[in-house]
Image: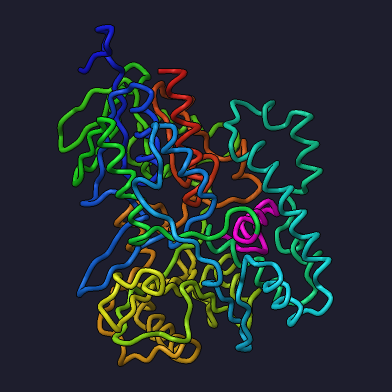
C-alpha cells in the first residue's frame, strides 16, 4: 500500500465502474490523497457516455450534449487543472430545432431577439410571459441547485426543516412540470417545446417535478448547450487522462463480482475470483443492480421504511439507431426533436401503459454537423433516440423489435428526409442491450425515476446505512440522473468519503 510523505499508509478506495460518476469521484479522491483503483466491466471507460467507431463513422452512444459546464470546470480546478487544457468545448447556439407533429418547427436560439421573434410567430403576445417563465425557472435553478441538488441530506430533518419547506413552497419545485409550464405558454406547441427536455432524464413532463424547468433555463439563459471537440467521449478521455495523471489505476474488462464484507464493513472487492483489499468501496454500478448482485442481503435495510428495492420506480428506456448516412443531411441541424402529433398520448403509452408508442416522438442528432471528422467526407453520422418503456411484460423486444425498427425508419424518411437506401451503416440498441451492457435494472437507460418519493431525501442515499464503508455514485442515487447531476454527486460523495474514511 502506498504511503504519504509522512510515512503513513494512504487509505485505498476501490471504485466499481468507470462511468462518469466513478471517474469524477476517482479524480477527487486521488486529489485528496487517497490511493484509488477503478474496476470497469467493459472494454472502455465512460459507461453510458460511450463511443462507437465503425466504417469511418463515430458515434457517442449515450448523452449527446453538455449542460451546466461549470460542474466539469470545477472538477478539473479541484485537481489544479484547467478543463480547456484537456478538451475544447464548442457552443451550439442555433443548432437545436423542435419540429412539431404538424411539420411546423421552432429553432431555439440563445440570442433573445431572434428567439422571441420565433416564439411570437407561434404564439403572438407571448413575450412578457416568456420573461416570467425565465424568471421562475431561474429561481428554481438557483435555489433548487444550491439547496437541493448540491446537498446530501443526512436525515429527514435536513430535508424537512422549516427553511427547506419554505423554499419548496416558494419555488413550487415539487409541483407538476407540465402544469407549471402551462402557466406561461398558452399554445400546445410552446408547452411542448419547453417541456420536452425531461426526455434528457427519461421522464414524462406530465409526471416530472416542476423543478426540472431548470433544464430549458440552462439551455437558454444560464450556460447554453455545448459539445466537446471530438464528441462527447472526448470528455471521458480528458477525465481518464487526468485520473491517470493523479495516480488512479483503471482496470478495464474487470467486472466486480461482489463487494467483500466482513463484520459489517466493506473490506474490498472480488474481481476475477481475486480479492482486492480496500478501506472503502465506491459503487458506480447502477444502484439497484448493486444491491441485488454485489452486496449481501443485509444491505437491503438501507431502504428502511421508504420502500423495498423491488418497488423502485424506473425511468423510460431508449430505442437507439446509430446510422451512417452516405450523403449530407442539409435539412437537419446538430440537435433535432421530432414531436408526435399525439404528444400527451405518446408519453401515456410509454409511462402509464408501458407499451411501445404508436406515433413516437424522437430525438435525432447529427454530430458531424459540428465535428465533420465524425463521418467520412460527404457523409453524416446520425444518432436516433426514441423513448420507450423500460423492460416489462407489455413489450416483447424479440418479437416486436423488428417491426418497431421499421416504424422508425418510416418516420425518418417521412419527417427527416432520410431515405433507407442512404444508410450504409447501422447499429441498433434496445432496452435489452442497456440491461446487458451496463447492468441497468429493467433496462432503464436513465436509472430510477424522479417521482416525488424518489427525489431529495427520498432518493436512495449515497452511503449505505447497513454496511460500513460502502458508498454510491451515479444516476440512481442522489442527486439524480443526467451527466451534470452525476458529476455533482461525485463531488458530494468524494467529500463524504474524505470526512469519514
In the rendered image, which quarter contains the N terminus? Answer: top left
Residue bounds of the magenta highlight: 202-220
In the rendered image, which quarter contains the C terminus? Answer: top left
Query: Count of labels shown?
Result: 0
Camera-side residue of 64 and 112: 112
- 137 is higher (above) or lower (below) than 275: below
- 419 is higher (above) or lower (below) than 156: below
Camera-side residue of 298 and 87: 87
- The figure's colour scheme reads rainbow
Q: Position of residue 278 (x, y in %)?
A: 27, 23
Taking the spot 33% from the left edge, 75% from the top edge, the residue there is 381
Q: Position of residue 364 (x, y in %)?
A: 45, 75
- The verdict on residue 214 being magenta is yes
- The verdict on residue 307 being magenta is no
Taking the spot 60% from the left edge, 76% from the top edge, the residue there is 107
- 322 is higher (above) or lower (below) than 292: below
Camera-side residue of 101 and 145: 145
Taking the spot 37% from the left edge, 28% from the top edge, the residue there is 29
Camera-side residue of 238 and 484: 238
Q: Position of residue 8 (x, y in %)?
A: 27, 8
Which picture quadrant has residue 268? top left
358 vs 13, left or right, is right
Q: Position of residue 108 (x, y in %)?
A: 61, 71
Amino acid at each position: 500500500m502506498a504511503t504519504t510523505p509522512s510515512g503513513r499508509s494512504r487509505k485505498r478506495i476501490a471504485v466499481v465502474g468507470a462511468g462518469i460518476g466513478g471517474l469524477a469521484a476517482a479524480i477527487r479522491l486521488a486529489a485528496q490523497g487517497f490511493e484509488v483503483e477503478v474496476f470497469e466491466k467493459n472494454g472502455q471507460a465512460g459507461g453510458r457516455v460511450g463511443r462507437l467507431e465503425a466504417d469511418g463513422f463515430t458515434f457517442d452512444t449515450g448523452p449527446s450534449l453538455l449542460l451546466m459546464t461549470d460542474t466539469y470546470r470545477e472538477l478539473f480546478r479541484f485537481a489544479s487543472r484547467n478543463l480547456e487544457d484537456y478538451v475544447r468545448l464548442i457552443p451550439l447556439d442555433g443548432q437545436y430545432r423542435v419540429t412539431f407533429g404538424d411539420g411546423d418547427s421552432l429553432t431555439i436560439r440563445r440570442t433573445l431577439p431572434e428567439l422571441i421573434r420565433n416564439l411570437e410567430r407561434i404564439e403572438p403576445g407571448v413575450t412578457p410571459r416568456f420573461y416570467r417563465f425565465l424568471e421562475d425557472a431561474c429561481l428554481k435553478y438557483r435555489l433548487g441547485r444550491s439547496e437541493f441538488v448540491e446537498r446530501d441530506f443526512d436525515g429527514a430533518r435536513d430535508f424537512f426543516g422549516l427553511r427547506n419547506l419554505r423554499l419548496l413552497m416558494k419555488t413550487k419545485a415539487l409541483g407538476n412540470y407540465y402544469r407549471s409550464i402551462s402557466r406561461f405558454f398558452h399554445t400546445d406547441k410552446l408547452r411542448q417545446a419547453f417541456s420536452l427536455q425531461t426526455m434528457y432524464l427519461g421522464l414524462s413532463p406530465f409526471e416530472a417535478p416542476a423543478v426540472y424547468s431548470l433544464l430549458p433555463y440552462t439551455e437558454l439563459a444560464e450556460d447554453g448547450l455545448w459539445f466537446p471537440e471530438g464528441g462527447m467521449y472526448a470528455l471521458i478521455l480528458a477525465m481518464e487522462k487526468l485520473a491517470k495523471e493523479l495516480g488512479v489505476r483503471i482496470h478495464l474488462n474487470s467486472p466486480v463480482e461482489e463487494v467483500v464484507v466482513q463484520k459489517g464493513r466493506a473490506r474490498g472487492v472480488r474481481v476475477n475470483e481475486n480479492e482486492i483489499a480496500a478501506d472503502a468501496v465506491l459503487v458506480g454500478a447502477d444502484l439497484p443492480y448493486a444491491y441485488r448482485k454485489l452486496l449481501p442481503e443485509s444491505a437491503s435495510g438501507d431502504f428502511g421504511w421508504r420502500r423495498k428495492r423491488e418497488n423502485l420506480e424506473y425511468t423510460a428506456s431508449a430505442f437507439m439507431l446509430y446510422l451512417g448516412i452516405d450523403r449530407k443531411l442539409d435539412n437537419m441541424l446538430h440537435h433535432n426533436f421530432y414531436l408526435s402529433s399525439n404528444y400527451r398520448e405518446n408519453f401515456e403509452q410509454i409511462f402509464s401503459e408501458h407499451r411501445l408508442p404508436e406515433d413516437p416522438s424522437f430525438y435525432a442528432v447529427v454530430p458531424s454537423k459540428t465535428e465533420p471528422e465524425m463521418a467520412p467526407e460527404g457523409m453524416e453520422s446520425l444518432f436516433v433516440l426514441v423513448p420507450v418503456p423500460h423492460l416489462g411484460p407489455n413489450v416483447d423486444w424479440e418479437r416486436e423489435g423488428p417491426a418497431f425498427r421499421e416504424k422508425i425508419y418510416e418516420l425518418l424518411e417521412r419527417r427527416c428526409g432520410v431515405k433507407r437506401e442512404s444508410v450504409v451503416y447501422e447499429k441498433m440498441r434496445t432496452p435489452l442491450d442497456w440491461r446487458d451492457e451496463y447492468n441497468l435494472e429493467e433496462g432503464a437507460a436513465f436509472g430510477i425515476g424522479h417521482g416525488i418519493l424518489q427525489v431529495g431525501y427520498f432518493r436512495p442515499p449515497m452511503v449505505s446505512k447497513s454496511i460500513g464503508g460502502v458508498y454510491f455514485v451515479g444516476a440512481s442515487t442522489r442527486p439524480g440522473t443526467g451527466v451534470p447531476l452525476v458529476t455533482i454527486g461525485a463531488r458530494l460523495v468524494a467529500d463524504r468519503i474524505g470526512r469519514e474514511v
